[in-house]
Amino acid sequence: MVCKILLVGTGLTSAVTGSLLRKMCQKHVNLVFWDKAKEVGGRMRTSMSPSNSNSIADLGAQYITSTQENFTNHSDLYESLILGKLLEPLCSKIEGMKDLPVGTKQFVAPHGMNSLVKHFLYNAADEIHFGYYVVSISKQGKRWLVETECGVNDMFDVVILTLPVPQLLDIGGFIQEIIHKNSEMKHSLKSVTFSSRYALCLFFDSNFKFNPGWDSKYICDNEIFRFVSFDNKKRNRPDLPSAVVFHTSIQYGAINSDRELNDVKNELVCHVKEMFPDWPEPEHIECQRWQYSQVMTPYLGQPGCLTIEQHPLLVAGGDSFMSSHIDGCISSAFILADTVGLAIKKSEQN
Ligand SMILES: Cc1cc2nc3c(=O)[nH]c(=O)nc-3n(C[C@H](O)[C@H](O)[C@H](O)COP(=O)(O)OP(=O)(O)OC[C@H]3O[C@@H](n4cnc5c(N)ncnc54)[C@H](O)[C@@H]3O)c2cc1C
């Protein structure tokens, strides 16, 4: 029998989980991915200038930092990304970066961070649907009935949720009853907290020689911005059109998280002009709100995966249950895939 599995989210955790399940279960699983977003990547989003397809920029995750231990534990996945030329060593200097333990490796994604997600997702998925905002998960017999805001619904044997926990808590239906009945789980879920940030990207059609003396840097003395990067230089592509990405500080994100996106965008653009009055006008500007940016308080014990219901199986994972970086997502994906794979084996034996 083929087990029909819904993976909610097309971020890194979901993509790696799908890829591991595909390897483990081959044709015994039907892997369906739904995401509320319009494109793949989640918080590893890569944006492209509408006027120049050579001009791309990472709006979320910027680069990869992997400790010796994590790199060894996840060596198969890293090898496949390096062999596929999707990861290269980080060569440009990032000013203000804290000292790293000996043996730590750092990488950039030359084609954008979302290329890492695509690598795993496209090899795993039977179906991918964007614009599917999951609003309700309920039991129907021995399966889950999952409904979206746009009126689509379907039945699944297993559901895997990889969204930030605050977004998981917004999903209605029977899932709410399960969580409310289990006070320990409810408390632990409600204790998960995230930072909020905005990303601003200025796309330039040509490669201006701005030469500010750095390629990327962490900013300590600015009331709005925390990080700035010439994205093309960061990705070891200095000759491509310049795209400059700014990330706001946690404090700015916290105070301004509910404002109109356009107001914030205008404020951020004005601030860049004050900081760099000599820069030319960009061809295109994009502003992204990351309401749930990086985990500040992860789920108690950082288990990697939470089984919300055993029969039928409903599990949650992602950086909320580990930590906000690539290895946190990969570790969670391994535990999610093992949990689901084991349940499928057991049900086949019965
Ligand atoms: C600004 C910023 C900078 C970062 N910098 C780094 C960095 O330099 N290095 C690093 O390693 N990590 C970094 N991170 C963290 C990293 O991006 C995340 O840890 C990782 O991408 C999380 O992946 P995920 O798959 O667990 O979750 P996500 O990528 O958030 O995927 C969850 C998906 O679920 C979808 N979704 C949510 N709710 C619903 C719903 N109800 N129905 C359907 N779909 C839904 C979302 O649209 C999303 O696509 C950064 C993150 C941000 C935001």
Image: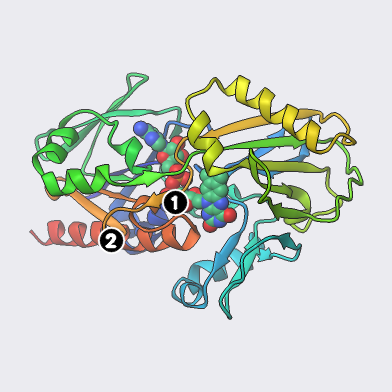
Q: Is residue 181 left or right of residue 83?
A: left
Question: Ligand 1: does it lie within 8 Å of the C-beta at label 1?
Answer: yes
Beta carbon of the mark 2 residue lies under 8 A of ligand 1? no
Of 62 and 99, nearer the camera is: 99
Mark 1, other Cα within 10 Å: few <14 / some 14–19 / many ≥20: many
Residue drawn at x 33%, y 42% as measured from the top left: 165
Q: Nearer the viewer, residue 128 or 241?
A: 241
Would residue 132 appear left or right of 113 to someone viewing this image? left
Rate crowding at label 2 as few (under 14), some (14 to 19) or many (20 or more) other CA atoms within 10 Å.
some
Tell me where residue 243 appears, x and y as whole percent. 77, 41
Is residue 128 visible in this depiction of the protein? Answer: no
Residue 203 percent location from the top left of the image? 77, 35
Q: Are marks 1 and 2 in contact (CB under 8 Å)?
A: no
Please indicate whether residue 58 sits to the left or right of residue 180 in the image. right
The residue wearing badge 2 is 303
Q: Which mark is residue 15?
A: 1
Q: Amino acid at mark 1?
A: Ala
Secondary structure category for the residue under label 1? helix
Is residue 151 rendered to the left or right of residue 181? right
What residue appears at the point 74 percent right and 27 percent down from the top-left corner? 270
Residue at image position (62%, 67%) is 106
Amino acid carrying label 2: it is: Pro
Q: Is residue 120 visible?
A: yes
Quadrant location of the C terminus in the rendered image: bottom left
Q: Is residue 105 above or below residue 263?
A: below
Element type at marker 2? loop
Q: Earlier in the sequence, mark 1 or mark 2?
A: 1
* Residue 314 horizontal/vertical position (percent): 21, 46
Task: Identify whether 258 is placed above or below 239.
Answer: above
